[in-house]
Amino acid sequence: MAKTMSCRDVGPDCDFVARGETEAEVMRQVAEHARTAHGIGQVPPELAAKAKAAIRDDDRA
């Protein structure tokens, strides 16, 4: 089942949503988004854990 994670669920007022087939794929998108949109060069472990906890099954699939 596909996975999704909304940036807004992690904290910032941001409409970005990552979607992928696996948690790893979603987390790669999240890391890239954090770098390009929020200026976070390397995602700290506590933020990565918060993002991973926000990943949900994509019920649109």
Image (spheres, helix red, strand yellow):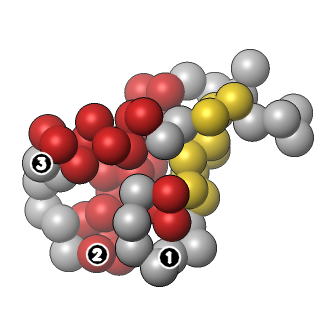
Quadrant in which residue 3 is drawn? top right
Quarter of the image that includes the C terminus? top right
Q: How many neighbours does mark 1 have within 10 angstroms: few (below 14), some (14-19), or many (20 or more)?
A: few
For marks 1 and 2, the one nearer the N-term is 1
**Residue 19 picture location, percent across and down:** 62, 44
Residue at point 62%, 34% (across, down): 56
> Disc 1 on helix, strand or loop?
loop
Residue 3 visible within the image: yes
| Above-or-below relation of 52 to 9 | above
Residue at point 49%, 27% (across, down): 23
Q: Amino acid at mark 3?
A: Pro
Question: On residue 38, which mark appears?
Answer: 2
In screen coordinates, is 55 left or right of 30?
right
**Residue 49 picture location, percent across and down:** 28, 36
Residue at point 55%, 47% (across, down): 5
Determine the CA span between mark 1 and mark 3: 19 Å
| Above-or-below relation of 22 to 38 | above
In screen coordinates, is 28 left or right of 61?
left
Determine the CA span between mark 3 and mark 2: 13 Å
Question: On residue 46, which mark appears?
Answer: none
> Disc 3 on helix, strand or loop?
loop
**Residue 18 picture location, percent across and down:** 56, 51
Quadrant in which residue 35 is drawn? bottom left
Q: Are marks 1 and 2 in contact (CB under 8 Å)?
A: yes
For marks 1 and 3, the one nearer the N-term is 1
Q: Amino acid at mark 2?
A: His
For disc 3, the marked residue is 44
For disc 1, the marked residue is 14
